[in-house]
Structures are given as C-alpha cells and as structure tokens.
Image: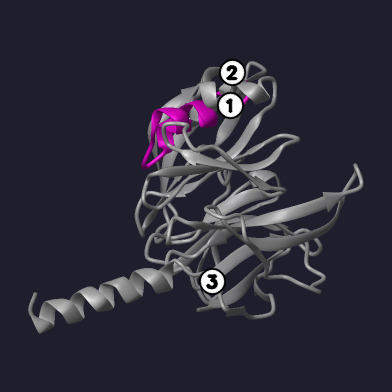
Amino acid sequence: MNRKLLLTTALLLGMGSMMAQRPSSFSEPRVLLKAETGLIAPVWSPDGSQIAVTGDNYTGIYVANADGSAMKQVSEATGAGYKMTWANSNEITSTPWTMVDNKRMTRVENVNVVTGTSTVVEAAERQFKPSRVLKNSTNLLQIMVDEPDNATRRISTLNAFEGKMVLNPALSPDGKKIVFQIVGKGLMVCNTDGSDLKSLGKGAHASWMPDSRHVMAARITDDGHMFTHSDIFCIDTVNGETMNITPNSEVIPVTLAVSPDGKTVAFDNDTDGAIYVIDLNY
C-alpha cells in the first residue's frame, strides 16, 4: 500500500470515528422560529438549508431558512404537517385530509416551497396507508407505519409486547436499523429484519444522528393532563450510553429533528409553542 493510499485510508477512518462519536459539547437552547400559532414537528430539508414546521393540530406548513430567516406559510391544509417529508429541496410531500360524508379522506400532495403551489399526487381515499409516502422503506417499517396497533403481533420479534402500539418508527440513515416506541415500554431499536432487538429505555420521537448509531430522543414526564418536564438525550444504540443535552433548561422538548450534518437539533417547545435549536460540537 503506497503512502497516498495509507494517508487516504487513515483520513477516512478518522472521519468515521469522528462521526460515530456523540457530541462533546452543546449550546444552550435558543429560539429559531416563533409565530402567533403554535409551531410543532420540525423537519430539515435534505441539504439542511431549510426547515419545515407545522401549526397546531398539524394544520398548514411553514418553511424557513436554517437560520430562522424568511419564514413563510406554504400550505394552509388541515393535517398537512402530519408526518410530512421532503421530496427534494424544493418540495414537501404532504398528506392533508378532509371530511366527506362524515368520513376522513386523506390525499397525497406535493407542496412547492418556492411558489406555495400544491400538486395532488394521489386522490383522497378512505383507507390510506401512510407508508406510501416513505422515501425509503422496508417490510417491517411499512408494518409499523401502516399497522401501529398490529405491529407487535405481526412482527415475530415483538410478539412479547403483543397488544401494545408501535409509534414513531424511523429508519437509520444507512437503512439498516429502525428506532421506534412501544407504548408503555419505551424506546426500542432493531435491525430491519427484526433481529437484535434492544431496549433504549424511556424516550419518544427519536431522530437519528448521521452515524446511524446514535439517536436524539425526548424523555418526557407528564401528570396525566399536561407535560411537566422533558429533556433531550443523545443515546448510543449499541451500548445504551446517554448524554443529557438540555440539563437545567426550562424548555419542554417534544418532537425533535437532527440536521443532516448532525450539527444541530431542532425541537418544538411545549412551554411557548416556539421552535428551538441546539448547536452540537464534536
């Protein structure tokens, strides 16, 4: 192996090691977006240059630059922000719904974030399967998304939890793992074939880090009526080690999203309905 190849290999190994590390430090939470309506459920664009959020009850879609500037509303549709995904850097795939003859009808449409125009991709229907809008999918992920009530029965490695609902499944960036919640049992992770199932303890709304090893998740406490406390933890899905990145903070994070480069985590704060961000250092 020549010197140039040795140097290239060493640099690649060093980069891989760096990306596999959890943050060494982090900033205090700061407000990124605020509006008259409450804002929730942030989602970063594929290149990390923009962030999309939705309003109370997932009504409408708002888009802003990553630094919080130039926020604008690009959709007013009911349910538009629920599980919205970026189709590309210019379009968001949305699943708004309407009531027809007392039946909830869900459609698929793409929203252009530049012009604000919407294009119907699939007509509204009663028996809508959310997995149809997944950019990447596996059989297990489809089951978790489409059949949250039956997933623990249909997936053999989850049979011990039969009767419990599966929530918020998320595929790792490398496409090899799924992190998800089981109601009453906390956060879990497994391979996409269901093997190597592990409990990660308490956690909700997990978002993968770019290394496909660590996740950020909220650990929320409530009194049966409202959220009373929450912290964001960085969790190592291999050894279970955790790091609290909101210690001594008064924010109550609920839904969160890690930026594509892993340098920022955005979240909605239940206390004031604003979107906050935390900078991550390595």
Q: Amino acid at mark 3?
A: Thr
Q: Which residue corresponds to the image point at 51% horizontal and 37% vertical from the top-left?
A: 95
Q: Position of residue 137 (x, y in %)?
A: 38, 36
Residue segment shown in magenta: 131-149
Amino acid type assigned to the residue bearing label 1 in the image: Leu
Quarter of image, res 271: bottom right
**Residue pictured at 60% horizontal, 23% vertical:** 152
Of label 2 and label 3, which has the lower sequence position? 2
Q: Which residue is mark 1?
A: 158
Residue type indicated by callout 2: Arg
Residue at the spot of label 3: 264
Q: Do the residues under discs 1 and 2 have CB atoms within 8 angstroms?
A: yes
153 part of magenta stretch: no
Judged from the image, the secondary structure of the residue bearing numbered disc 1 is: helix
Q: Which residue is mark 2?
A: 153
The alpha-carbon separation of the residues under discs 2 and 3 comes to 37 Å
Q: Nearer the viewer, residue 208 or 114?
A: 208
Q: Position of residue 155 (x, y in %)?
A: 52, 23
**Within 10 angstroms of label 2, few (less than 14), some, or many (20 or more) residues?**
some
- Which secondary structure lies at badge 3? strand
Residue 112 shows in this picture: yes
Q: Is residue 44 left or right of residue 224?
A: left
Q: Quadrant of the N terminus?
A: bottom left
Which residue is at a point 33% across and 76% down the rendered structure image?
14
